[in-house]
């Protein structure tokens, strides 16, 4: 009877060690995936910001051209 309990305890100990290792591996994998997802979201956000800045610079250039035209028109008055 005592040997059966020892066997069960040893099997449970081994299962606990294996389970702990698998939990550690799973934690590492999920953390890596979370970091990659976070980086991809950050890259997308930065791309959107760059695109917005490009449209802003285009608007500024257009306004500058309009100002130059208005300046020329004022000079001729």
Image (cartoon, rainbow, N blue to C red):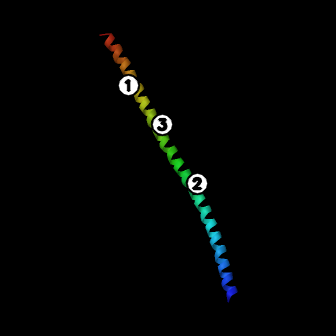
**Mark 2 crowdedness (10 Å alpha carbons): few <14, some 14-19, many ≥20:** few
Q: Where is residue 57 in the image (x, y as percent from the top left)?
A: 43, 29
As drawn, the residue found furthest toward the bottom would be 1
Q: In which quarter of the image is the N terminus?
A: bottom right
| Residue that mark 3 sits on | 50
Residue drawn at the location 56% of the way across and 56% of the way down = 31
Give the residue drawn at x 65%, y 69%. 18
Foreground: disc 2 or disc 3: 2
Instruction: Kindly identify which residue carries mark 1.
Output: 63
**Residue 40, how many percent across, how many down?**
53, 48
Compared to residue 41, the image places residue 2 above or below, namely below
In the image, 65 versus 44, the foreground residue is: 44
Secondary structure of the residue carrying tag 3 is helix
Which residue is the extreme one toward the right? Answer: 3
In the displayed structure, 75 sits above or below 1; it is above
Above or below 53: residue 73: above
Q: In which quarter of the image is residue 12?
A: bottom right
Q: State the residue at coordinates (60%, 62%).
A: 26
Q: Do the residues labelled 1 and 3 touch (CB within 8 Å)?
A: no
Query: In the rendered structure, which disc, 1 or 2, sits on the residue that comes first in sequence?
Result: 2
- The local secondary structure at tag 1 comes to helix
Left or right of 24, for residue 46: left
- The residue shown at (34%, 15%) is 71
Residue indicated by mark 2:
32
Circle nearer the N terminus (1, 3): 3
Q: In this view, does 68 lie to the left or right of 5?
A: left
């Amino acid at each position: 009877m005592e040997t059966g309990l020892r066997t069960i305890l040893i099997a449970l100990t081994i299962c606990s060690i294996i389970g702990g290792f698998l939990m550690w591996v799973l934690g590492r994998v999920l953390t890596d995936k979370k970091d990659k997802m976070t980086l991809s979201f950050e890259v997308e956000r930065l791309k959107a910001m760059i695109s917005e800045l490009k449209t802003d610079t285009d608007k500024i250039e257009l306004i500058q051209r309009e100002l130059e035209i208005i300046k020329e028109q004022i000079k001729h008055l």
